[in-house]
Each structure stands twice: as structure tokens, then as C-alpha cells.
Image: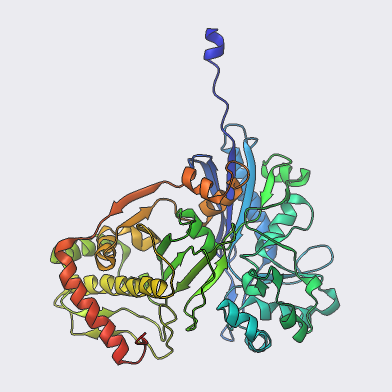
Amino acid sequence: MSGESSRPTPPSPAVIGIDVATASVRALCVDGQGRVLAEARADLPPPVRTATGTSEQDARSWWPAVRSALRRTTGALPRGGREVIAVAVSATSGTVVPTGSDGEPLGPALMYDDRRAADLNAEAQRAGSARWDALGLSVGPTAALGRAVWCLRTYGSALHHVLHTPELIGRELTGRPVATDWSHALKSGYDARAGQWAHEVFDALDFPLGLLPAVGAPGAEAGTVGPEAAEATGLPEGCSVRLGMTDGCAGQVATGAVEPGRFVGVIGTTYVLKGVSEHLVRDATGAFYSHRHPDGWWLPGGASNTGGECLADIAPARLPALDAAAAARGPASYVRYPLCRDGERFPFVSGAARGFELGGPRDEADAHRAALEGVAFLERLALDRVERLGIPVLGPLHAAGGGSRSAVWTAIRATVLDRPVRVVQRAETAFGAALLAATGTLHEDLAASAAAMVHSGALVVPVPAERPALEETYGRFVVALRGRGWLPDD
């Protein structure tokens, strides 16, 4: 009896999320409670970008990097990877690869920011205007749809499929072709509302739909790990391979914002707002567009040109001291719109928008504080836009991205929004992919996966003493945007 009680508890089943980013691959293994068991990364060659707008990466480098990251991750697990029951892959949105009859790339991957097919995307916009208008989408110059057509016109009869990153990795894992998910397929011309590729657009561009992959819901099973991949990665043969989502959507899922009314604000280089709505909402300005939720809801969101980039000239080592000084001084003495680029795309669309200041800083702390407030003002405009479109925003705003690590910035955001802000741990693409791998395997659905596995950090509440001053400054900010004709009155 004592011998039985002393036996070690077998490791719990686990899942792995794989993030194929631009610079590296990350593999993250977690259990059903979201505890990190092991992780590893492998570098990728940098994309080759030219002044003409092309952007390419060697697609043949992806699988060796994934294989390496998985091998080191499974090697660090107690059972050498045998406890892993599912994996899912997330990658950059809109990256496509031309492949031949053997499934191997015919050339480099055309990256998400590649502009070589801008003219073809303009044709696609005209051919599918009724469909895109109904979806609230536009086919911009960097859309993957045009690049798919470019691949056919470049490679001709040698082209057998145009795939996204996860399908290449999925084929290596399973040993056979796999479907894509409707998140990665969105910018390639998939209509998730109708459940079909935009056939009239592809017909107009003489592109056979047979060159595109089958499409399924994120979290659905695409296949199982085959013997060769099992030997190469340490994953068990028969391990479920689940469909993922694009990096941005997986990052949202990782925050736990997976049910209607829940939203996350991400401050990275730029500001991104993403959330969940029960119904598809069309934004006539084009500032918002929606991915499809794995459970059939919608994921409205938008990305600003304003964000953490406004602090790029500050040495990272100096930021804590500046944050402390900004917290001590209180609300800034002037208004700053910290846009570092030409034009704004969210929460309003204006090619004429430029950064500006109303007044000037009294000192360095004042300037820093005004920049933090300016991004928070954009966030408030974004949430106001959501609510004017009829989408309820419930509970605290989830916060992610590098900006959420700043306590003073998070407090400013909460005060400007007059809403608590919850900072989320491990709000990253690989963790979101792991939640999708757990959906239907460790947990019944995505909501159950998020409830069990996402661990929130501190809840930051508004600072009542600072709210009147910030409200006054925000009002001046809005008036200035409208006075310049950038922000519509409605």
C-alpha cells in the first residue's frame, strides 16, 4: 500500500502551440490549466525586402525551424513528448507560398507586406465589390488574394497550390495535404460568412479555385502526426494536428477575450483593438474588419498607425525612470497626438492625418506623459467607435503587448476609458495556438479552454483624481481632430 502511494503521478496531457513569426519559430507546451511545461525557439532568415515593395522569405526554412523548436520542447518534457496530445500552428496573416505537385515550394514565400500584386488586388476589389461591402472588407494593396493570382501568372502549369504557412507545416507533420483555417484564408479571398471562396472574384481573374486549399474552422482537426514527423520532432505518432489562426487572432485568444463583448487592446509598435461580437458588423469607413470566431461569432478589430512607436527614440533602459517621473507629475500640461507616420487607419481613416501638439512640454516627463495619454485617447476613440457600431463592450478591457508592462500607462488607459484594465499574462501567439490545440482535446470548446488556461494579471482601476484633467484634455484632442477634418462628426 505504501509503495502504491509513493508512485509518481503521471504527467498530465499537454498541448503545443507553434508560432511561425517573421524572425523566428516558437513552440510552447502547456497543460490543461495553462501551466507552461517547456518552450523553445529557432531563428528564421530575415525577409528580403526591396524598394519596389516586394517582401520574400525562404519557405524551405520554416519546417527545419519548427522541427528544431519542437524537438527541444519535447526533449524537455518528463515523458519526452509522449504527453502531448495536440498541436496547432499560427503564422503571419496573408503570407502565401506557391507549391508544386510534390507539395514543395516553387519559390520564396510572398510575405504579408508584399505589394507586388497591388494592381491585381485593385481588380479583385472591383470584381467583388458587392461581397466586400457586405462583409465590411476591402482588398488592400498587400492582400494575399492578388499574390495568389500573381503566383499563377508567374509559375503557370507548374503551380499546383497556393498555400499559407500552416498548411506547409501541417503537411510535414501529417505527411499529407491539410486544410487551412478561415482566419489565415481571409486575406486570400475567403468569405467566412458564406463559407466559400469569393468565386466570382477568382473567375474574373482566371484563377481556378482548385489551386486553393480546403477551409475549416480554427481548432478543428486537420490530421494526425505521422511516423516521420514523430521521429523528427519527438511528438507522439497519432498526436492531433489542429487548425490555428493568424498571429493577431491567436494573440487575442491568448488574452481570454473569446466571448461576445470581450475586447483586448494591444500596444505594440502600433495600437490594435480586437474583440468578439455575436453578429457581423459592417463599418462603412473601413476602419474595422472582422475575422470569424471559431464558434461562428465574429472578431471585429482594427489597427492604428499610432502606438508604442512614439517611444522608439527612447533607450529602453530609460523608460522605467521616465514612467516614474510621468506618474509623479500627473496629467500632462498639453495635448499630443503621437502619430509618427503619414496617415491614420484606425479608429478613423485619413491619409492626411499627421501627429501634432497643442502647446508644448514643460519638461521631459511632461512630454513622455503626453505621449502615453495620446495613445490612450486613440484607444478611447476606438472603443467609442465599437459601441457606436452597436457592439457592446463588457467588463474590463484586456491589455496586452509591450505597452501593457508599463504600470503608469495602464493606469492612464483605465482613467481615460473610465473602465478597469486587466493585464494578461502570456498574451502571445504561441499561447493562443496552444488554446486552439486544447479545443476539442483537453477542453470542450474555446471558451472552456480560455476559462481553464488563461491566467490574468492585475486589475488596474481608474485614478479618480486624474480623471477631470484627462477628460478635459481628451475633449481638446477630439476637437482638434475634427477641426482638421480627420475625424467625422458622427
Residue 356: x and y in percent read 28, 85
Left or right, 335 with reference to 425: left
Residue 131: x and y in percent read 64, 80
Residue at left offset 57%, top offset 42%: 443
Q: Nearer the viewer, residue 321 or 264?
A: 264
The answer to whether residue 205 of the structure is visible from this angle is no
Left or right, 70 with reference to 349: right
Asked if residue 161 is positioned above or below residue 445 in the image, the reply reads: below
Residue 187: x and y in percent read 62, 73
Which picture quadrant has residue 106? bottom right
Asked if residue 145 is positioned above or below residue 259 in the image, the reply reads: below
Asked if residue 265 is positioned above or below residue 123 in the image, the reply reads: above
The answer to whether residue 160 of the structure is visible from this angle is yes
Q: In which quarter of the image is the N terminus?
A: top right
Residue at left offset 69%, top offset 42%: 239
Q: How many marks?
A: 0
Q: Which of 325 and 424 is in front in this view?
A: 424
Q: Quadrant of the C terminus?
A: bottom left
Residue at left offset 58%, top offset 63%: 246
Residue 57: x and y in percent read 63, 70
